[in-house]
Amino acid sequence: MATVNFSVRELVRMYEDGELNIAPSYQRKYRWPSRVASVFVESVFLGLPIPPIFVATNDNFDWEVVDGVQRISTLILFLSEDVGVRKRVGREEALRLKDLEKLSQLNGTVYTDLPVGIRRYFARQPLQVISLTDKSDKAVRFDLFERLNTGSISLTPQEVRSAVYEGQFIDFVEDLSTNPALASLLKLQEANQQDGTAAEQVLKFFAYKNDQPSFRGAVTHFLNEYIAKTDAKFDYIAERELYEKSARFLAEAVGGPFLRRNTPVTPLVQFEACMIGIARIYESGADPVVPAIDWLNDTELVAASTGGTNTRAMLSRRVDRAKAIFSGEA
């Protein structure tokens, strides 16, 4: 681990040149309103203590921001004159300062409005960067990212996972998370609509369907392990077809959001079981059927999908029940 100081201008330049990276899942998490971002800029102007920015060294020796995404993104939005660069961190317009108390004379200005001397002063302000040793072990890096994920807007395990395990399989999962049938089924709380919840449902589908015997109850570890051992042998074409066919059937069977009685949002554990049960029927060479019973509120399925659900026994119980329901055996 190495600690170095970089000027604000140098950090922004490194991002513009591709030497400093913010993973796409992290970029989507830029949520600082202008008021909060402006106060941070004011703190830099005033030379107030700023927490260090943590970065991890990747295989090609560029740096990936682990902790400090909001701060780095704010500096980019304030300094960078490249609209394309600003759009990469989630905003097109340059940051216009507002609601400053100490430096109220700067309210209403963007960086280019400032006198040259003031711009140079700000751009030269130093920030501490702590570079973490490269960790080729993805499990170690995931744990590291999670431990440092302490910002005011923290990331979900799936968002961290998307950054750590980036590659063909994660891209595949992210793509399927936009499936229209899936979108029609999932009714999520507002906070979960852009936090990787849909992508995690896709990941769970393949992990539980293809590797259920390896599940021991620790969901995060199980999902990470599944990604780590999913390689070129994964049949992307067949698996995509199966997922889309299963989601399409379930969407038609439900006819709207997947909701059981008195649930304002989709009960995800039950939803997962139904998707896997339907897929297993297709894999057996049969076709699922829309049951005549009130299957969304089926007592056995609900009981196996609520309470202490993260056990091997409960997983098997609900998937088996879902398969029986959509096989017409219930």
Image (tube, helix red, strand yellow):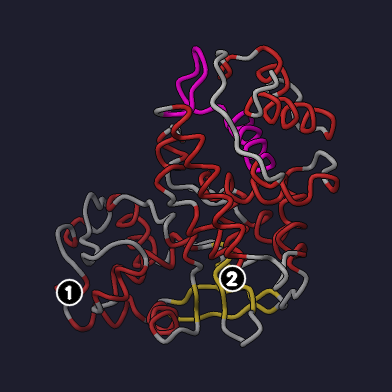
Q: Residue 275, position in %: x, y?
A: 60, 38
Which of label 1 and label 2 is nearer to you?
A: 2
Would residue 84 appear left or right of 309 to someone viewing this image?
A: left
User: Badge 2: how crowded within 10 Å, few (<14), some, or many (20+)?
Assistant: few
- Look at the image and give the residue range highlighted in magenta: 257-281
Q: Residue 265, position in %: x, y?
A: 47, 26
Judging depth in this view, the residue of 157 and 198 nearest the camera is 198
Give the spatial CA distance, label 1 vs label 2: 45 Å
Quadrant assignment for the C terminus: top right
Would residue 91 appear left or right of 257 to someone viewing this image?
A: left
Are the residues flagged by discs 1 and 2 in contact, CB closer than 8 Å?
A: no
Judging depth in this view, the residue of 123 and 143 nearest the camera is 143
Quadrant position of residue 284? top right
Q: Is residue 153 above or below residue 237?
A: above
Residue bearing the label numbered 1? 114
**The magenta stretch spans residue 116:** no
Q: Residue 287, position in %: x, y?
A: 60, 38
Q: Amino acid at mark 2?
A: Gln
Q: Amino acid at mark 1?
A: Leu
Q: Is residue 139 above or below residue 270?
A: below
Q: Secondary structure at mark 2?
A: helix
Residue 168 image label: 2
Would residue 262 appear left or right of 322 to someone viewing this image?
A: left
Judging depth in this view, the residue of 309 and 32 nearest the camera is 309
Q: Residue 324, position in %: x, y?
A: 71, 26
Quadrant position of residue 184? top left
Which residue is at 74% across, 74% downward?
135
